[in-house]
Image (spheres, grey):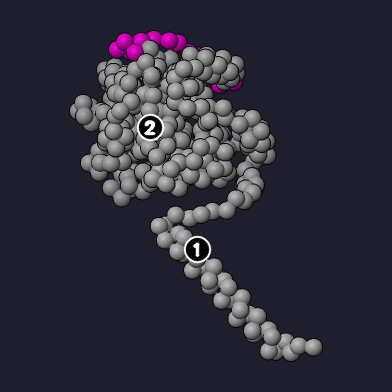
Amino acid sequence: MHDSRVIGPFLRGFCFLVALAAAQQAVAREGDGIRHVPAFDLPLSPYMSPEAQAAARAEIAEGDPLAHMSNEELARNIQQIRASVDMSIAPRVEALRQRYGVSLRQEKWSGVPVTIVTPKAPVARGLLIELHGGGFIFGSAGTLGMLEAIPVAAMTGMRVVAVDYRLGPEHRYPAASEDVAAVYREALKRHRPGDIGLFGCSSGGVLTSEALAWFQKERLPMPAAAGVFCASADARYGGDARYVVAAVNNAPMPKPDGSLPIMEELYYGQADLADPLISPLFSRGVLAKFPPTLFITGTRAAELSAAAHTHSRLTALGVEARLHVWDGMGHAFHLNTDLPEAQEALEVISRFFKAYVGRVGR
């Protein structure tokens, strides 16, 4: 028989030494600051609605075919990708039009095609300009743009002008910024700057930040407010979230330096993504002139870190900035208006623009 009074302390001491040695090895291995994270199972967040959990399960089962396509493959198949995206979204757009009772019409503002969404309710004095997503290579004002333009128009009572800016790879930076500025100039002929808001999702959110920088370069007055949704003022999509979300979504992992080919490069070409006209995050002077800005994102969205960092930089500069994050939700979740979380986000967006756009005295 053994004496536990002697053996117990010995075993505890031995275990402590083993744990210490393992920790020292981990420190030595991770002395470069890189964490080597073992694989683990990540369940759906308990904070997600049942509808969002069901949507997430379906998304995990289906996967994202574009996530594993090289830029060469994307460019080679771009016409088929665009047609497929537009065809899949068209029924959703029609359902939204009927659900919210808005009217749609196509025009050209300063030569740029736009889709104008007019709400059924009395139109408020404000005008909102929407910039669609699609990685700067697919999507349009009348498809992806409508997924947020229609509900936002209906919920704010403001007309929304969705912009069909030029896309890559046929067009390169700064084509999209130029198109947004052209539409904005036309809007300024009809409205005061204080009656105009600007917003977009994904690449449209990045373009919103780029447009604010471009307006400054062109010496145009700032709009009353901006919405940078599922995006940031950093076109690189950097930070922790880029790695974590790549692992969660079974997408290609970035290199240790954070570099990873992104589809947006088919639009940016050889442009420097650290240029403040592309990533305003790199200029305190540009950021300081931003109007009140709203950020919408989720914990499983690759832009989370960049959005949070942009928000913190704006706040440090004294700019009115708001950041809303939904646990468990992924990129562009608010475009699925069937989800309770999307409705919550749209309510936040609506209240924000109604608070800042069209205020008397601005």
* Residue 98 sits in quarter: top right
> Is residue 104 visible from the viewing direction of this image?
yes
Is 254 placed left or right of 55 in the picture? left
Quadrant of image for the C terminus:
top left
Residue 290 locus on image (x, y percent):
29, 37
Q: Are marks 1 and 2 in contact (CB under 8 Å)?
A: no
Q: Residue under label 2, please give it.
A: 206
* Residue 12 sits in quarter: bottom right
Give the SS element for disc 2: helix
Foreground residue, 232 or 174? Answer: 174
Foreground residue, 51 or 355? Answer: 51
Is 17 placed left or right of 212 in the picture? right
The magenta stretch spans residue 264: no
Residue 325 locus on image (x, y percent):
50, 44
Identity of the residue drawn at 45% across and 10% down: 105
Give the SS element for disc 1: helix
The magenta stretch spans residue 110: yes
Pick whichever of labels 1 and 2 is earlier in the sequence: 1
Q: How packed is label 2: few (under 14 Cα within 10 Å), some, or many (20 or more)?
A: many
Identity of the residue drawn at 25% across and 41% down: 283
Q: How packed is label 1: few (under 14 Cα within 10 Å), some, or many (20 or more)?
A: few
Residue 35 locus on image (x, y percent):
48, 55
Start and end of the magenta stretch?
A: 98-112
- Tag 2: amino acid: Val
Mark closer to the observer (1, 2): 1
Question: Which disc, if any, is residue 146?
Answer: none
Q: CA distance from mark 1 to mark 2?
A: 38 Å
Question: Which disc, if any, is residue 26?
Answer: 1
Number of marks in the rendered image: 2
Identity of the residue drawn at 52% across and 40% down: 246
